[in-house]
Image (tube, rainbow, N blue to C red):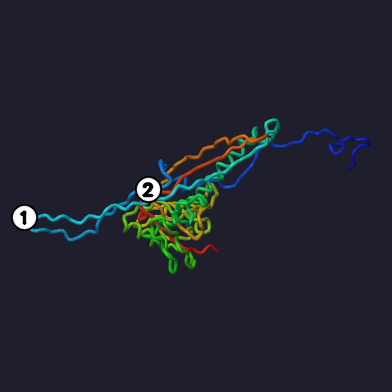
Amino acid sequence: MAQPANLLDSYDLAGIREDLSDMIYNIDPEETPFYTSCAKVKATNTLHEWQTDALRASADNAHLEGDDTVAEARAATTRLGSYTQIFKNSVTVSGTDSGLSKAGRAREMAYQILKVGKEQKLDIEKALFANQAKSAGSSATPRRLAGAPAWLTTNVGNNADGSDPTGDGTDARTDGTQTAFTQADTDTVLQSCWNAGGKPDTVMLSSFQMDVALGFVGNNNQQATISADGKKVINAMAVYVTPWGQVTFKPTRENRSRDVFVMQSDMWCVANLRPTKSEALAKTGDNEKRQVLTELTLVCKNEKASGIVADCSTS
């Protein structure tokens, strides 16, 4: 079938307005489960410090009737600390932007600051998981916080030829040969945490290691069923129950896939020296400048409460 003669169709017409949706779609992940789960406390110095203590080992305790009491040797508390790390991003927008009509946002600066805030949270999450030691920095090098792997030394699994850190944040882990992550590794670390007095509640791991965890066997730790009414296949780690405690598996995106963290959540927090803030910078021309800045450090209240399955294969 042909068009009638002299028909004006949309291909011939001029002046058709563009059809641009007033929405911007972005599906990049922005979740920060470790950073979000950490309680937030106040820091008042670039070196934030705290103390840990321990009970002596149990002993045979029996005394003669009427004997004199002798003073016992008592151990002092352990003083720990980490340095605050500055996270900073900036946005500069031309003054012309104020006169433009744009799709999906009214002001470019407001849109970009919102976007930068999400990106900076991901940077913080990455730093909290990073295998990096604390550093005081200098006028030429930035301060750095000690990431989670630099604290964990008591409860470690799957580290055949790697080297554990000192456990005070002064050095990072030395990676070893990677081997497959197993259910036995998880159980070993959970048991070690329990023996040390910890009560882990969360296992944080990459999507690759989460896929391995879905293969764990045992009662109540995995669901792989078909719901007849909803016609759904469910294959998800809900709660992993062991004699050493009950933990939830939580996939994370910003940690190294070789590290699987067994965490007692209330034994970690973030100390903010300067909470996240958007600030206007000095005007130097026909533009607007703003920065988003956060300064904080990671606090490991007592590393014996948590653990790590190290050097897991990632392929």
Above or below for 176 versus 230: below
Residue at left offset 57%, top offset 43%: 89
Residue at left offset 60%, top offset 45%: 27
Instruction: Determine the residue located farthest toward the left in the rendered image.
Output: 66
User: Element at badge 2?
Assistant: strand
Which quarter of the picture shows residue 222? bottom left
- Which residue is disc 1 drawn over? 66
Tell which circle, 1 or 2, labels the residue nearer the N-terminal end. Answer: 2
Measured as percent of width and height from the top left, residue 37 is found at: 44, 45
Measured as percent of width and height from the top left, residue 29 is found at: 57, 47
Q: Nearer the viewer, residue 68 or 237?
A: 68
Q: Nearer the viewer, residue 143 or 184?
A: 143
Residue at left offset 29%, top offset 52%: 77
* Category of crowding for the residue at label 2, using alpha-carbon neighbours closer than 10 angstroms: few (below 14), some (14–19), many (at least 20): some
Q: Amino acid at mark 1?
A: Gly
Which quarter of the picture shows residue 285? top right
Check residue 170 in the rendering and tell me which mark sits there, or answer none. none
- Which residue is disc 2 drawn over? 49
Residue at left offset 58%, top offset 42%: 116
Q: Nearer the viewer, residue 47 or 297?
A: 47
